Image: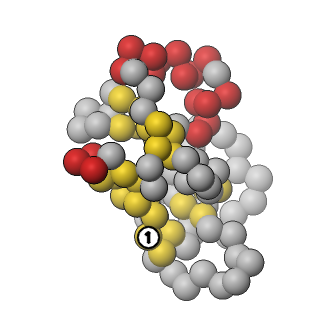
Amino acid sequence: MPGHRPPPEEVNTLELTQLYNYYFAWGADSREAAIALGYGSLYNHSYTPNAKYQKDFSNGLLKYVCIKDIQKDEEITINYNCDPEDRTPVWFDIVSQN
């Protein structure tokens, strides 16, 4: 999924905006940022996701891959910690979990 990459000097200011909840840490040292276009930055978090994302730095892409069957009308979810098995607490209160 193509995205937008703000200039590196603007990444720290994302924390002061609503975009903070929608960007991905980017680059080998995670000091850059990427915002997925389309639905990519809108998929909800789950500790039991049905998809995962992969960062393809060389092509400037975020790739979403199904890790479970996803039924028609089922929500696509990802683990915001990148690893589908990672149970590290996220920065927001979780309303419900799958």
| Kind of residue at badge 1 | Val
Q: Left or right? Give the position of 33 relative to 80.
A: left
Q: Is residue 88 visible?
A: no
Residue drawn 33% across the image and 46% down it: 60
Q: Position of residue 90 (x, y in %)?
A: 56, 44
Q: Is residue 50 above or below residue 53?
A: below
Q: How many marks?
A: 1
Badge 1: residue crowd in 10 Å (few <14, some 14–19, many ≥20): few
Q: Where 17 sits versus 36, above or below?
A: above
- From the image, tell me which residue sits under label 1: 65
Q: Quadrant of residue 32?
A: top left
Residue 95 horizontal/vertical position (percent) = 77, 53
Task: Please give left or right for residue 76 compared with residue 31 in the image.
Answer: right
> Compared with residue 16, is residue 92 higher up or lower down, i.e. above or below?
below
Circle 1 SS class: strand
Q: Is residue 71 left or right of residue 30?
A: right
Q: Is residue 60 above or below residue 63?
A: above
Please tell me which residue is depicted at 52% across the width and 51% down the height of the picture: 80
Q: For the point 70% across and 50% down, which residue is it?
A: 94
The N terminus lies in which quarter of the figure?
A: bottom left
Q: Position of residue 78 (x, y in %)?
A: 54, 61
Residue 7 visible to an observer of this rendering: yes
Quarter of the C terminus within the rendering: bottom right
Quarter assignment of residue 47: bottom right
Percent from the top left, x then y, of residue 5? 42, 33
